[in-house]
Structures are given as structure tokens and as C-alpha cells.
Amino acid sequence: MRVVAAVLAVIWLAPLAWALDTALKPESETTRIPVSWFVSGMSLDAFGRVFADGQVLAWLGNSLLVGVAVTVLTVAVTSLAAYGLSRTRFRGRSLVLALLVAGIMVPPQVLIVPLFAEIVGLGLADTYWALVLPQVVLPAMVYVLKRFFDGVPRELEEAAVIDGAGRLRVYWSLMLPLARPALAAVAIFTFVTTWNNFLWPFVAVSDPHLMTFPVGLTTVQSSYGVRYAQVLAAALLGGLPLVALFLAFQRQLVTAIKG
Amino acid sequence: MKRSGFWFVAPFLVLYVAFLVVPMAIGLGASVTDEGITGHAAFVGAANYGELFQDPVVWSSLWHTLIFTVTSTPVIVLVGLVMALLADRAVPERWLYRLAFFAPYLLPVSVVVLIWNWLYQPGFGLINDLLTRLGLGEVGWLSTDGMAMTSIVITTVWWTAGFGFLLYLAALQEIPHQLYEASALDGATPFQQLRRITLPLLSRTHQLVIVLQILASLKVFDQVYLLSGQGGIPGVRSIVQYIYESGFTRFRVGYASAISYVFFALIAVIALVHFRLTAARGSKR
């Protein structure tokens, strides 16, 4: 069993290892036949050139900006909505709930054409707004948080209300701290999804300065020519931050999925 | 107090209506017009819907999508399950398995495609080099339609098996240890434990992983489009790719919207069937 596991792990890591190996080679050695893992002159030069070029860093900056903006907005609006739906009764509540369930079934892919038409109509094409706002709409997250709030005993809240706290106070200083694990799961999921999202950012912006990393990277193959070491260095530079984060937060992630 | 609840929902609702409900309405409206690049649109009734059912590209794209789904889903689910069973054991190198199996899932699609494009290269590609060394011939991984689809499936398995792996891993950790200890006392072999305890207790997870995987596969675009050189291999074109091309390279907004709606109906039916099955099973228990 241990051998099988080790072999599978090696196979799974090999593509990444090979990419790293290539990125460390001098350009002249990358296309040599027969293939060799170890050549003379291995160095970090390709990574240095990616940094010097600056474009990849700019795309990573855009991804970070868009990812953080979408995550913060999503956590804020979905937790407010989930609290409202879980703890209050208002006219139209059942309509909102029905809309949410219907929305969970809508694949983002079927929206791209009309959504782009709308964004152009609003004059938002090629802006950060176009990248951020449509990605905040995650009805499933409202649903997840609502179910969490539904599970919090009402007595806790009633005590606070008797003490004179308004709904907003109860939400902010009682419910949000209680919901921290669920909010963390929503935040992690939203950030990873946004960071890696391809189709919408791909159609939403055409200005290279606004591209997120996954979109920008598809253009380097042509602009770098046949400099394979540099292309793979760029790919790894953008791919590894999330892997590093995963290593740091492994345990929390598995716990979050169980919940 | 009666109305205050609405204000909690309002911020989300504004964004939800603006960027989900409104585009759905725009798409429905556009699907009955001949809207193109000029923005001028005339009402054409059901003409787009009539056209799409006779468009051979719609059918071939659906066919490619179906082939992709049917070939990739079982492999991805099975690999994810095997990975979880292997990584759930209490061995010190467990963290390494988790990293190896899940790391690809965290990579953006363009990184995955760059790496695999590099692996699939003729001559100096790692895979073809290995085949040559083993005395086997080189394979033109992205040269024919059939091979390109195989390569796309292989790449997808590597990229996304980590998702099922994580769901299975979480489910395995929920199974009480006592079950294994008790059955071991009764003389059960590890294989019997797997067949009689582990797999049956994972049945809900199987269903979840399979349905999520099918739905995700039907929506495939990114890796198909990018590995085929931004649409350079029409023989693997997926249905979402045809929506994209109709809207953004042929600028037929009306037609693309009509295909989107038919595709949405297809997805919705599958999702509803899943909900019904889950609900039916839930009520039986």
C-alpha cells in the first residue's frame, strides 16, 4: 500500500517537478534530445527575467486585487443576506429563497454572452469593476451560511436583544464571531475560485494591464517566443502561491469541508 | 422590525439581480433576435432555436462534450477515491500525499495547460522521451482529434482528481475507528473491511462526487480550448466553447444566447434529477 501511494505521488508530482527542472535550465538546453533532468548551468536566471519583465507580477497583482475584493465583498453581502434570511421574516422572503435555489443551478458559462453585453452597455468593459462585481454573485454561499445561522440556538440571540442590542449589533458582534469557521470556508472557497477563474476574466478584459494571471499567462507563449524556461518559470511563479497557502492551511481546509 | 430583515438581504439582492437575473433576462430576450455586432436587433421569433437544432456544429460540440464527460468522470472519481484510501492511512508521510494529490487542483488552468503542452511535445517532451527510451514509438499527443481528446482527459484527471480526493478524505475521517477494530477482532481482512465497511459508508459521497463531476464536465471549456491552441482543433470543440465562439468571434449574440438557454435546460434537468434522487433517498431513511 505504501509503495502504491508513493508511486502515485511521484507520478502526480512529476509534471510539476519537470516544469521546475525546465525553468532552471539555460534556454539552449531546454529542447535538447535526449531529454536530461540534470544539465550544466542550472540557475534561477529564467525567474530573474520574469521578474525583470514585470508583466507577470502585474498580472499577479491584478489577481490578488480582484481575489481580495471579490472575497471581502462576498463574505460581507452573503453573511448579511444569510443572517436576514435565517432570522427575520419579511415580505418577499420566500421569493428570495426561491430565486437563490434557482440561481445555484445557473452555470456561469451560460451567462457570459448576455453578461458581456450588459457590461458593455454599462460602460464597464475593460475595468476592474467588470472583473469584480459579476463574480460576487454566489448564491450557494448564502445558502451555506444560512444553514449555519439556522443551527445557532435562538436563546443566545434573545438574550442579546433583551439587553437592547439592535439586529445589526447582534449580527456583527454575536453571529459573525460564532460563524468564523463557516466564514473562513466561504472566504477560502471564494478566493481560490476567483483566483483561478478563467472564462469570465478572459472575455471581460482585453487590456493586458488589467488581465488577471490565468488570462495573461495565455498570452506569454506567443510574446516570449520559444523561451520555454522563461514561460515555465512564469507559470510556476503564478501557480505556486496557492499551493504554498494550502500547505500552511491543510488541516483547516479538510475540517472546513467536513463541516 | 418587520421590514429590517429585507435590508440585510438588499446588498446581495442588488448584485444578484444586476449580474444574474438581468443577464438571464437579456439572454432570453436576445435569443429571439438576430442581435449581432452592430447592436441592432430584429425580432426573429424561434428562428435561432430552429437553427441550432439543425446546426451540425451544435450536435458535434454536444457529442465531444458527452465523450469528454463519459471518459473523464469515471477515471477522476476512481482516482480520487484510491488517492483518499491511500492518504487516509496513519503514516508519517501523509502530508506529502495530500500535497501531491491536491496541489494540481489549486493551479490556474493556464498553468496546467502550459505544463502539459510542454510534456506532450514531440521529441523533447518528457512523455515522448520516456516512450522512446522504453522502445515504444512517439505519440502525436495533440496531432489528431482522438489523441487530442485523450490528452485533454489525461490532463483533466491530473488537474481535478484532487477535488474528489478531498471530499472522499473528509468522508473517510467521519467513519468511526471502532468499526474497523471490531471487524478486525472478528477476523475481517483489510480487503473485506474495504468492501463491507468503507465503500458502503461512502455511498453518499460517491453520489455527490459523481454528480458534481458530471455537471462540471458538461460545462468544460478552459482546458479544451487552451490545449487545442485556443480552438485550433475543431474536432474537440465543447458546447460551451461553441457558445463562446458564436458570441465572441462570430458576434452572433442572439444565436449564442439561444444555445446558452438550451444548454442551461440540459444542466437544469440533470440537477433536478439529482435533487429528486437525493430527496427520495433521504425520505426513505
Image: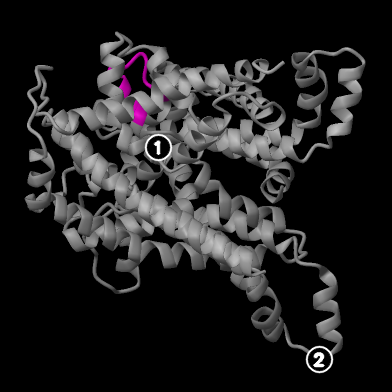
- Amino acid type assigned to the residue bearing label 1 in the image: Leu
Q: Chain of mark 2?
A: B
Q: Residue at x 21, y 39 (%)?
A: B243
Q: Which residues are magenta?
A: A200-212
Q: Quadrant of residue B23?
A: top left
Query: Is A155 on the left or on the right of A80, as rendered?
Result: right
Q: Position of residue B46 (x, y in %)?
A: 11, 39
Q: Quadrant of residue B126?
A: bottom left
Q: Which residue is mark 1?
A: A232
Quadrant of the rendering where the N terminus of chain A is positioned: bottom right
Q: Which residue is mark 2?
A: B187
Q: Residue at x 30, y 48 (%)?
A: B265
Q: 10 Å neighbourhood of mark 2: few (<14), some, or many (≥20)? A: few
Between the C-alphas of marks 2 and 1, the distance is 52 Å
Q: Nearer the viewer, residue A30 or A242?
A: A242
Report the residue that reaches farthest toward the top. A123
Q: Are marks 2 and 1 on the same chain?
A: no
Q: Residue at x 58, y 35 (%)?
A: A141
**A101 is higher (above) or lower (below) than B129:** above
Query: Is B216 on the left or on the right of B196, as rendered?
Result: left
Q: Is residue B191 magenta?
A: no
Checking the image for residue B278, the label placed there is none
**B199 is higher (above) or lower (below) than A130:** below
Q: Residue at x 55, y 16 (%)?
A: B11
Which callout, 2 or 1, points to the residue nearer the camera? 2
Magenta segment main secondary structure: loop
Q: Is residue A203 magenta?
A: yes
